[in-house]
Image (cartoon, rainbow, N blue to C red):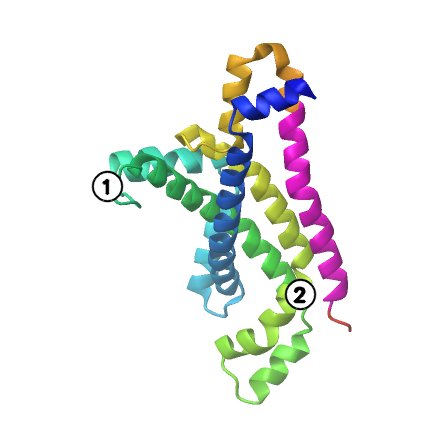
Amino acid sequence: MHLISELFSDYPIFGAFKQTIYLTLLSAVFALLIGTVVAVMRVSPIRVLQLIGTGYVNIVRNTPLTLVIVFCNLGLFIQLGVAVANKSSDTFIDTNNFRLAVLGLSVYHASFVAEAIRSGVNTVPLGQAEAARAIGLPFLKTLRHVVLPQAFRGAIAPLGNVLIALTKNSTVASVIGVADSSATMKDMMENRPDVLFVTFGIFAVGFVILTLPVGILFTSLSKRLAVKR
């Protein structure tokens, strides 16, 4: 116990996990927004939108996340000069890297969110959409008032799996200098190789504490909110 206390006092482990939580929550919100738009495009009756949505999912989902994150930094920021933070700020580099990491994680996981929502749309009986159109509702209002509310309830379990994957994948953000749990673990491994297994144990337990309640919560919600047929 003394060794663990010493490691917690020497390294910002709690702060690193706090950064991981911020990174995960912000990325989850943006991934949900982007993924919902892409899912609507995928089920749209307009052929061009279907092709754009399908192309987005197939291209982004099959691209390694590391490449997406690195592109956000080297491609958008360094090559194209796209900055997402105030350049006059003293914390510009850290803030810019953090926001670029959020962008990369959001864009990447939006493809999985879109497929989860589309699977939820497929659980809605076709007759309900036809009934909505029969009373004069256009496509977007049919989606908003009839299809999507049921689709989200049907997609809760897969959305929970995406959130768990996002929590673990947030460690990739360390490749562009985001000081999350992965970066702190790397520092500990370099400076204290004599306690390698303890270091692994601390971060493994940390991620289990973060992800296990999410799995239990979403499984419970999926059962409670399932649409009765």
Dominant secondary structure of the magenta stretch? helix
Q: Which mark is residue 153?
A: 2
> Residue drawn at (43%, 57%), measured in percent from left and top?
52
Q: Which residues are magenta?
A: 201-226
Q: Is residue 216 magenta?
A: yes
The image shows residue 86 at horizontal and vertical percentages of 26, 45
Q: Is residue 84 above or below residue 195?
A: below
- Give the mark nearer the N terminus: 2 vs 1: 1
Per the model, the C-alpha gap separating discs 2 and 1 is 42 Å
Q: Is residue 37 above or below residue 71?
A: below
Q: Residue furthest left?
A: 88
Q: Amino acid at mark 2?
A: Arg
**For this view, does 193 lie left or right of residue 75?**
right
- For mark 2, does the 10 Å Cα neighbourhood hold few (<14), some (14 to 19), or many (20 or more) residues? many
Which corner quadrant of the image does residue 126 belong to? bottom right
The image shows residue 82 at horizontal and vertical percentages of 27, 43
Q: Is residue 207 magenta?
A: yes
Q: Amino acid at mark 1?
A: Lys
Closer to us: 225 or 47: 225
Picture quarter with the N terminus:
top right
Residue that carries the numbered disc 1 in the rendered image: 87
- Nearer the camera: disc 2 or disc 1: 1
Q: Is residue 109 above or below residue 63?
A: below
> Residue drawn at (40%, 31%), measured in percent from left and top?
176
The kind of secondary structure element at disc 2 is helix
